[in-house]
Amino acid sequence: MISKTSISAGLVFACLSIVVANANATSKNCPPEADYPTYIKADYVFACMAANGETPEMLQKCSCSIDVIASIMPYEDYERADTVLRIQQDIGQRGIFYREASWAKAVVEQLQSAQAESTLQCF
């Protein structure tokens, strides 16, 4: 006769096997360090489509563009560059600092380079 303990142990083992298999599949398909949050990708695509036309073709091209950028630069770098670009729009002292600082220029240049590559590949 099979005991409740052996059935429970079997179920736990089966569940853990599924979790490990899913974790392995996820890590092979989309490494966490390179993955961008969905809302960031959506925001990029919406802005890209607003600038280039709201057509199915642009949806495809803009989606391709953020995927290429994500393959080139880690999300942390993208987030830093996006923040710098937003702060550079300030007209006060903070904006001036972020427009003139060499490290800020380098961060923005990295994003612009990734965007140029995405334009070549997707548009």
Image (cartoon, helix red, strand yellow):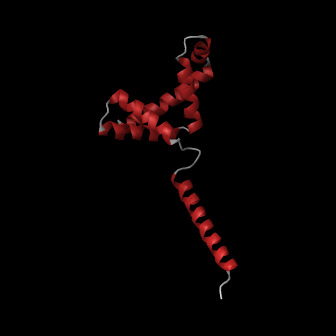
Residue 118 to residue 90: above or below: below
In the image, farthest residue toward the right: 5
Q: Residue at x 55, y 44 (%)?
A: 34
The number of callouts visible is 0
Report which quarter residue 55 is drawn in.
top left
Residue 1 appears in view: yes
Q: Residue at x 30, y 39 (%)?
A: 57
Residue 69 appears in view: no
**In x, y percent, where is residue 67?**
45, 41
Which one is nearer the viewer's eye here, 83 or 7? 7
Q: Residue at x 53, y 26 (%)?
A: 109
Residue 101 to residue 43: above or below: above
Residue 106 to residue 33: above or below: above
**In x, y percent, where is residue 87?**
56, 20
Judged left or right of residue 107, residue 42 is left
Q: Residue at x 36, y 29 (%)?
A: 50
**In x, y percent, where is residue 100?**
59, 15
Which one is nearer the viewer's eye here, 53 or 71? 53
Report which quarter residue 5 is drawn in.
bottom right
**In x, y percent, where is residue 18?**
57, 65
**Quadrant where the N terminus is found in the figure:** bottom right
Judged left or right of residue 12, residue 48 is left
Which one is nearer the viewer's eye here, 10 or 45? 10
In the image, farthest residue toward the front: 4
In the image, farthest residue toward the bottom: 1
Judged left or right of residue 69, residue 23 is right
**Quadrant where the C terminus is found in the figure:** top left
Which one is nearer the viewer's eye here, 112 or 92? 92
